[in-house]
Amino acid sequence: MILVTGGAGFIGANFVLDWLAQSDEPVVNLDKLTYAGNLETLASLANNPKHVFVQGDIGDSALVDRLLAEHQPRAVLNFAAESHVDRSIHGPEDFVQTNVLGTFRLLESVRGYWGALPAEQKTAFRLLHVSTDEVYGSLSASDPAFTEENKYEPNSPYSASKAASDHLVRAWHHTYGLPVLTTNCSNNYGPFHFPEKLIPLMIVNAMAGKPLPVYGDGMQVRDWLYVKDHCSAIRRVLEAGRLGETYNVGGWNEKPNIEIVHTVCALLDQLRPRADGRSYKEQISFVTDRPGHDRRYAIDARKLERELGWKPAETFDSGIRKTVEWYLDNAAWVRNVQSGAYRDWVKKQYEAA
Ligand code: NAD
Ligand code: TYD
């Protein structure tokens, strides 16, 4: 048994789906179901006895203590977080609450549980904390990519809250000996991505005939990691990562935002051409830049390759094509997520249960 937190969000849900497709080991999935949590993503697991969904907060110590005692997981994987930089600029408190205080409470619950385990289970137990490359701050065009040795220099309320959580995880290892692993990954993309983030927003807006808002000059650079590659990296780190270590996870796909938007438009032009025969690029609209916008992130994922033999399976070309196709094939998921209909769906599931 493993306990996954935030498993109704974009990456956590992809992870749970992948895990149960490959393993017989059951998953307890603890998720608060904020605006970003979506049980519809997990609909294919509705009758799967290996998936136990629990709505709740990682900061609810009584609940987490009870789940740990009841299910006796051999590992806890912490995906739960507030994750959107723009939201963190307009309302940072939720980020501190969940990412900092929530992680602290989770660590304390896990420490209590782990401390009382019999010797063999205690040695085998792992807490894997999922974090971001944004903790390292912003690079100039000539800087080398982030390695695990880079200083933490977070710039947004989001990245500062994630940096704080990483420090807590580190401290619980050094102080209490908690067997932790931390992964810092780049921008994920793929199926079930909430359309507030760049790639799904561009696909969804393009199809709806809406403007494609590009912040500033569109020359900010991100590294893009296909979400299923991220899931395989996490499985690998859980299996063989060295205790107390951090591992950077990236796709080796550094690209300026405007290039991403052009690629999405070109794929849509090909797969679902506009009725008037013109390119979706005509919908691009340069808008006011995000305050404190980090210029460049880039991940050096060689430690993970060298020590654990992990490499991404997708190129950006293959991953972005799959992603655009997924959004075109799953219009109902997109409609529900935008209309809030999935909240009614969630409510119905609970009433039925
Ligand atoms: P997401 O916003 O899509 O999902 C987060 C999930 O956590 C949601 O289901 C939400 O309901 C749940 N949640 C929020 N607060 C909670 C709480 N207090 N208790 C329990 N559940 C709670 O985020 P994501 O994109 O899936 O990101 C997952 C993790 O990966 C996060 O820790 C994020 O910081 C990290 N990360 C994401 C990216 C990315 O590109 N998406 C990149 C680097 C790191
Ligand atoms: P985002 O998906 O929000 O991820 P993050 O800020 O965590 O990297 O944004 C990715 C990049 O795209 C980032 O440089 C901001 C930019 N962006 C836009 O230009 N327009 C948009 O509408 C959004 C959501 C993001």
Image (tube, helix red, strand yellow):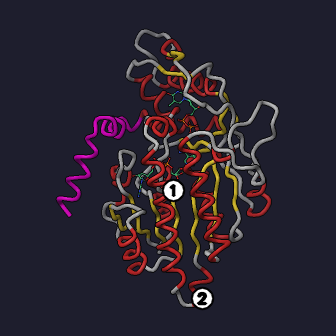
First of labels 2, 1 by sequence position? 1
- Looking at the image, is 138 positioned above or below residue 263? below
Give the residue type that dot 1 points to.
Val
Across and down, in percent, residue 118 comes to 54, 90
Q: Residue at x 68, y 45 (%)?
A: 153
Q: Is residue 316 above or below residue 285?
A: below
* Residue at 57% across, 35% down: 320
Say left or right for 301 vs 3. Answer: right
Residue range highlighted in magenta: 329-353
**Residue that badge 2 annotates:** 120
Residue that mark 1 sits on = 100
From the viewer's perspective, is 217 left or right of 209? right
Q: Amino acid at mark 2?
A: Glu
Q: Is residue 265 visible?
A: yes
- Closest to the observer, 134 or 52: 134
Q: Is residue 218 left or right of residue 50?
A: right
- Can I make out residue 10 in this image? no
Q: Is residue 64 left or right of residue 163?
A: left
Q: What whole-number distance in Å separates the C-alpha atoms at marks 2 and 1?
A: 30 Å
Location of residue 309 in the rendering, given as x and y in whole percent from the top left corner: 75, 60
